[in-house]
Image (cartoon, rainbow, N blue to C red):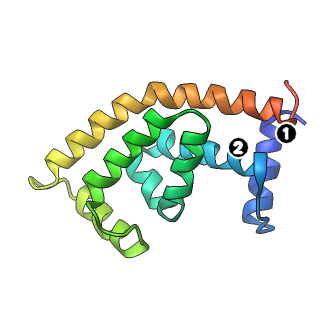
Amino acid sequence: MNADEYWRDLVNRVFREQAELHGDEERFYRLSCIYGETMVDGIESYFERRFDEFATDMDALRGAGFGKLAAEYERARKLMFGSLPLDREVVETTTLRLLDETEESSPVLREIGSIYGRIIPQLEQLADYKYAFGLAAGLYRAA
């Protein structure tokens, strides 16, 4: 099975079968979600979809050698949510406020844009890392 086939199978197992992942599969899945959610729709999207996984996701980044990238996500978290807990209500309220693009939210949005600009090259490195990791872990074969 190649990487694309493996990813489709993994997503199916997680979402349809409610499979609980462990070890290498869990790490691969977390890193893939961090990459995908952020690259597709930005940092705000990552928090909207993964707020309840934030601490564990950041541990996975650090464990993979991406401490600098985790620190950028932590900056974004603090900028967007301050010291509030990351729960659905806080995330939805904050995201809606940011989407309004008011005078009050403009400085936050500009800084999030700066953070996003800094993390894009790191996310590209993460993509390379997770592909190599999946190969080395035997999750799939090279195409």
Q: Residue furthest left?
A: 103
Q: Quadrant of residue 135?
A: top right
Q: Give the structural element (helix, strand or loop) at label 2.
A: helix
Q: From the viewer's perspective, is residue 141 above or below residue 103?
A: above
Where in the figure is residue 28, as x and y percent of width and height?
70, 43
Q: Quadrant of residue 131?
A: top right
Tag shown at residue 131: none
| Disc 2/disc 1 C-alpha distance (Å) | 9 Å
Whether residue 53 sits left or right of residue 70 in the image: it is right
**Quadrant of the frame with the N terminus:** top right
Q: Give the structural element (helix, strand or loop) at label 1.
A: loop
Q: Amino acid at mark 2?
A: Phe
Tag shown at residue 139: 1
Where in the figure is residue 106, as x and y percent of width and height?
15, 48
Q: Amino acid at mark 1?
A: Leu
Kindly identify the residue that appears in the image at 46 percent across and 24 percent down.
121
Q: Residue beneath label 2, please?
A: 28
Where in the figure is residue 46, as x and y percent of width and height?
46, 51
Q: From the viewer's perspective, is residue 75 above or below residue 88?
A: above
Kindly identify the residue that appears in the image at 74 percent across and 32 percent down.
133
Between 82 and 3, the residue placed more toward the observer is 82
Q: Residues within 10 Å of mark 2 (few under 14, many from 20)?
A: many
Q: Are circles 2 and 1 on residues that touch, CB within 8 Å?
A: yes
Kindly identify the residue that appears in the image at 36 percent across and 29 percent down.
118
